[in-house]
Image (cartoon, helix red, strand yellow):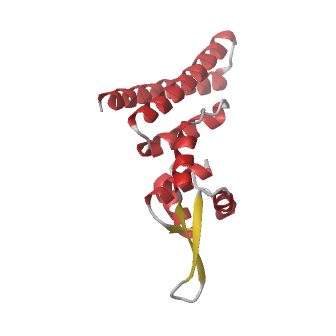
């Protein structure tokens, strides 16, 4: 997820590592707040793979700074990350799906629809599995409430995806 967030931010503007961190925190703090210890190695990987380039310079205060920008390959990688299959693990699915939705405006209409359909399909599968779990077991109060809440959350998320699909289809 961190690579997706970094590429999304660099697609908008050239940033230092601090700027990348600050932009992610500003734009995605309700979804995730990655540390420098996560951002720095991710930037290194992205640069090694040719998805970002850095320009070293000396700041006004005399300190060395590196400014990162996205490459053409990086834009393609951003689109690939958005289009890739959503995680099968339900714990990872909703946070990643929300980040993908927040970054979806970099996709074309067709690619956006494909992403939405993939997210919806995975959400429906998780919803189905959760409903089966609740219906097949005699759950005590707390687990039942937790799973009932999860069912509501997935139903709402699927409704959101369907609204996005309608909007995307009309465009």
Q: Is residue 71 above or below residue 16?
A: above
Q: Is residue 7 above or below residue 117?
A: below
Q: Quadrant of residue 80?
A: top right
Q: Which residue occupies the extreme top position in the image? A: 136
Q: Quadrant of residue 144?
A: top right
Q: Position of residue 18 (x, y in %)?
A: 56, 69
Q: Quadrant of residue 150?
A: top right
Q: Residue at x 37, y 28 (%)?
A: 163
Q: Residue at x 47, y 46 (%)?
A: 103
Q: Residue at x 59, y 36 (%)?
A: 84
Q: Position of residue 38 (x, y in %)?
A: 67, 58
Q: Is residue 166 left or right of residue 55?
A: left
Q: Position of residue 169 (x, y in %)?
A: 34, 27
Toward the viewer: 140 or 2?
2
Toward the viewer: 20 or 135?
20
Q: Position of residue 160 (x, y in %)?
A: 42, 30
């Amino acid at each position: 997820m961190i690579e997706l967030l970094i590429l999304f931010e660099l697609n908008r503007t050239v940033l230092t590592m601090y700027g990348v961190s600050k932009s992610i925190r500003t734009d995605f703090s309700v979804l995730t707040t990655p540390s420098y210890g996560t951002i720095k190695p991710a930037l290194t990987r992205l640069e090694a793979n040719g998805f970002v380039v850095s320009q070293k310079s000396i700041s006004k205060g005399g300190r060395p700074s590196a400014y990162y920008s996205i490459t053409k390959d990086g834009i393609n990688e951003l689109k690939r990350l958005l289009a890739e299959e959503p995680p099968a693990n339900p714990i990872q699915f909703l946070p990643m799906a929300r980040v993908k939705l927040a970054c979806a405006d970099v996709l074309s209409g067709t690619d956006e629809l494909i992403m939405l359909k993939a997210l919806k399909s995975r959400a429906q599968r998780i919803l189905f599995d959760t409903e089966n779990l609740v219906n097949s077991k005699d759950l005590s109060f707390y687990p039942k409430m937790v799973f009932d809440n999860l069912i509501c959350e997935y139903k709402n998320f699927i409704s959101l995806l369907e609204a996005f699909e309608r909007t995307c289809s009309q465009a």
